[in-house]
Amino acid sequence: MISWYSQQLLVERRSDAPDPHRLEELKERQRACREDRSTLEDAGPTELARITTTYEALLDNLESTE
């Protein structure tokens, strides 16, 4: 997911008219992914389940819109 957001940020930045709101949204989501990734090693079962569910839903959503 972090890579996907990085790619989308690059595409948006290189567009003829970058959308500042989209850029900010992508940055915020990428930051959230990094924060979740940093907690994985110490996460308990409940937190792991939350992260797994969240990213499964994000992936499903992205795959359905591509």
Image (cartoon, grey):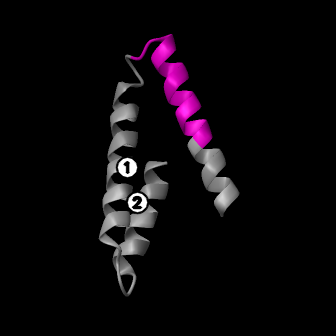
Q: Is residue 14 left or right of residue 62?
A: left
Residue 32 point in image, percent of width and height:
36, 41
**Disc 1 target residue:** 30
Q: Is 4 within the magenta?
A: no
Identify which amino acid the numbered label 1 is placed on: Gln
Q: Which residues are magenta?
A: 43-57
Q: Residue at x 36, y 56 (%)?
A: 25
- Of the image marks 2 and 1, the number of the one nearer the N terminus: 2
Q: How many marks?
A: 2
- Mark 2 residue element: helix
Residue 47 point in image, percent of width and height:
46, 18
Is disc 2 in contact with disc 1, using a CB cutoff of under 8 Å? yes
Examine the residues drawn in magenta and state their main secondary structure: helix
Q: Is residue 58 left or right of residue 20?
A: right
**Disc 2 target residue:** 6
Residue 40 point in image, percent of width and height:
42, 25
Please identify the quadrant where the C terminus is shown: bottom right
Identify which amino acid the numbered label 2 is placed on: Ser
- Mark 1 residue element: helix
Q: Residue at x 43, y 49 (%)?
A: 2
- Residue 5, above or below 52: below
Count residues near mark 1 (Cα–Cα under 10 Å), then give few for <14, some for 14-19, many for 20+.
Answer: some
Q: Residue at x 36, y 25 (%)?
A: 39
Q: Mark 2 or mark 1, which is nearer to you?
A: 1
